[in-house]
Amino acid sequence: AGRTLPPPGPAGRVAIATVWDGGHGYACAIPLWCQGASRLASVVGDAELLILSPKVSEDCPNARYLQPARTIQAAQSYLHRHEGRLGRNSGQRGAFAVSNLLKVAFLSLGSTYELLLYADLDIDLMARPLDAATWRSGAEALLRSSALFVSLFDHASPVNGGLWLVRPRCDVFSQAVELLERGRWSAAEGFDGVGAPRSFLRSRMREVAGRLAAGSDASLFKVEGTINGTHYGKLNSWDFVNGALDQGLLWYLFYLKNDLGTWARYDRGELPWRVEHFWGVSKPWRAAAARGYWKRLPPPPGGGGAASSSRAPPPLATASTRPKSAPRATAARRGRTAPRCRGRS
């Protein structure tokens, strides 16, 4: 059912965010992500980089680092309750599963940011650069609409959890974290027994498809065919890639439980902005022939390689924030308290 939208965050304030588990596996992804996010931030204007991580990376010193204690505990509780019952495509334990579920912590930042763009660490955000006019047009369209969340599908899921734009709201965050703390998931019926993908009434799915069509400028026929073409639709199952983690959770929260989600345009021939997502197990910075990946980056001053600090950031409730007058290189070392949702994030 539709919901009354709460007041927006501070006008014009934007965050570009990601999650890093602090491990070596993705440490070498940070330089390129940070380069793309920084360039995008300069286009957007009043934008801040956020990294949710137990560590501070020296390869992205201009970011603000967060540690959401409550969401971490909720994610661990969810994974413990469902151990061995998350299907074949979301059955990973440990840092990978926790990191994917922690994305919902960014929904708690509605009192600080009007818009938040989330991008996985393995994304080059400026593979085809975005210009200010295109950003402004898209952002204004979202802010004028009733939607809070914009994403696109992939081969498996109606929501690709690797890249999305949201107007953060505390009430949706509360729903997410309460679901992780006490909710249930099954391959047959999804989160809290919402139902198998093909079990919804035709009229209900027409409503969902109508909202996706409104954002994507696609026909209802094309949108419905796209949903049915994902593993979610074809297999009539929630056991698709990350269906029990971020991708299924975001689809449930914004598109099925609340009428707050839409899709971006996906006619590839007309897209003015393109990112490159190095999805899958094999990552270009790990490959033997990684020269092409590193050529996307300028050489570090004085040579040397990437390094990451093991110093832990403060909890989200007192997370560090870069003051406007502070040098960018010291951003992660300065802190002040920012307004939050009630309770811990």
Image (cartoon, helix red, strand yellow):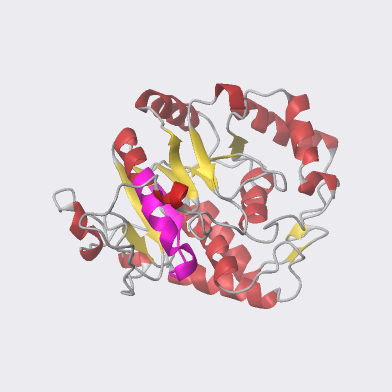
Q: Nearer the viewer, residue 316 or 289?
A: 289
Q: Nearer the viewer, residue 99 or 305?
A: 305
Residue 242, image x and y in percent? 67, 58
Residue 163, image x and y in percent? 53, 45
Which quarter of the picture shows residue 312? Answer: bottom left
Q: Is residue 181 magenta?
A: no
Q: Inspect this view and state whether residue 112 appears.
A: no
Figure check: 56 above or below 324: below
Left or right, 208 with reference to 215:
right
Q: Inspect this view and state whether residue 294 appears.
A: yes
Figure check: 311 above or below 128: below
Q: Is residue 33 magenta?
A: yes
Q: Residue at x 78, y 25 (%)?
A: 221
Q: Residue at x 81, y 48 (%)?
A: 197
Figure check: 120 above or below 142: below
Figure check: 209 above or below 110: above
Left or right, 256 with reference to 116:
right
Left or right, 65 with reference to 231:
left
Q: Residue at x 49, y 31 (%)?
A: 142
Left or right, 263 with reference to 135:
right
Magenta segment, principal secondary structure? Answer: helix
Which quarter of the picture shows residue 217? Answer: top right
Residue 68, image x and y in percent? 43, 67
Q: Quadrant of the C terminus?
A: bottom left
Q: How many marks?
A: 0
Q: Quadrant of the N terminus?
A: top right
Residues shaded magenta: 16-36
Residue 37, image x and y in percent? 37, 45
